[in-house]
Amino acid sequence: MKKELIRAHNFNAGPSALPLAVLEKAQEELLDLQGTGMSVMEMSHRSKEYDALHNKAISLIKELLNIPEDYEVLFIQGGASLQFSMVPMNFLAEGKKAGYFMTGSWSSKALAEAKVFGDTYEIASSKASNYKYIPALEDLEYQKDTAYVHLTSNNTIFGTQWQDFPDTGDIPLIADMSSDIMSKPFDVSKFSLIYAGAQKNLGPSGVTLVIIKKSLLEQEKANLPTMLRYSTFAENNSLYNTPPTFGIYMIGLVLEWVKDQGGLEKIYQKNQEKAALIYDVIDNSNGFYVGHAEKNSRSLMNITFRVKDEELEKKFLAEGKARGFIGINGHRSVGGCRVSAYNAVPYESCLALKEFMVEFQKNNS
Ligand SMILES: *Cc1c(COP(=O)(O)O)cnc(C)c1O
């Protein structure tokens, strides 16, 4: 007898939930992908079957994000963390400076890597408030000779998200979108480079999506190692060496699912509804639950909060775990609670968590 499938209420911050339909499709194709008698992991990355999957993933990214013609879509390894280094290595030229927005731990790590390669400065920082908010778009100043400006679109650990992006004029804008790419529509043409580790909204870990404007690519520095140059990936359709084939295949399946859901407008609407369930509990709790992010900076992907006293918080996390809510403890660096409600987290999981939160408050007030 087949065991009944019980899927977890998975609020993990990353790697995180994948759509059940995608996992089922991958399972179905694992032993025999489209009549080849092989899984995608067993076939040549030079085969026509793999080539079709690879190009399908790229064309779905272009279609869903409405990417203009003058951009390249690349798959690189090393995670978003390697992009922290690759960006300045390729584009922080001698005599220029890189401007960074400091909105959380990932921004700090990105800035630290840029310092290895050249001069940097902070454009604005919310560090003094423990990264509770995103800087206002007014009155931002960029220094002369700024090579590029870098921001983190969604701060996975602190639960803040840019609601709109700054206009940097002629200065290339670069964004780490690891934790909110594909969660809502946005204007790609504002950016010269976007990168995102796949393991939050796109697929399994091991692949990093890079979207780069061709005009930025032309400014790449000379004499860099082959595998650390964006042009190597652009000139070879990300097939210079063996790419992470399984991960790219999974991204293709996830994006087909996004399209089936109705595309980014629909996904955005659902994400708003899901996040509202949890934020409403926090806002209506009379201080029992305390949100970390300021309201106008709240993330739809990572909802961070504390329970009013520490003992109750421990109890909340323990009871939540016992009830099957996975991944609701905050990041080890900040503590508290964090609920990650990425694209693939079902509405029903958020509703179940909301009900648990309301009940927990009632039983402990
Ligand atoms: C998860 C995450 C990273 C780290 O990604 P890796 O792929 O593990 O290097 C970087 N930036 C943001 C915003 C993240 O959410």
Image: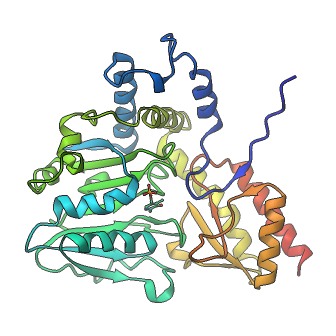
User: Quadrant of residue 84 in the image?
Assistant: bottom left
The percent coordinates of residue 224 (x first, y second) are 15, 53
At x 38%, y 79%, the residue is 136
Q: Quadrant of ligand 1?
A: bottom left
Image quadrant occupied by the N terminus? top right
The percent coordinates of residue 315 (x first, y second) are 83, 74
Along the horizontal axis of the image, is 225 left or right of 155? left
Question: In the picture shown, does residue 241 fall above or below 91?
Answer: above
Along the horizontal axis of the image, is 226 left or right of 288? left
Kindly tell me whether residue 69 is visible in this rendering: no
Image quadrant occupied by the C terminus? bottom right
At x 56%, y 38%, the residue is 261
Foreground residue among 336 and 21 = 336
The percent coordinates of residue 280 (x first, y second) are 70, 69
Farthest residue, direction right = 363
The percent coordinates of residue 295 (x first, y second) are 56, 76
At x 53%, y 66%, the residue is 299
Kindly tell me whether residue 132 is visible in this rendering: yes
Foreground residue among 218 and 242 = 242
User: Quadrant of residue 163 in the image?
Assistant: bottom left
Question: In the picture shown, does residue 325 fall above or below 20?
Answer: below
Question: In the picture shown, does residue 223 fall above or below 67?
Answer: below
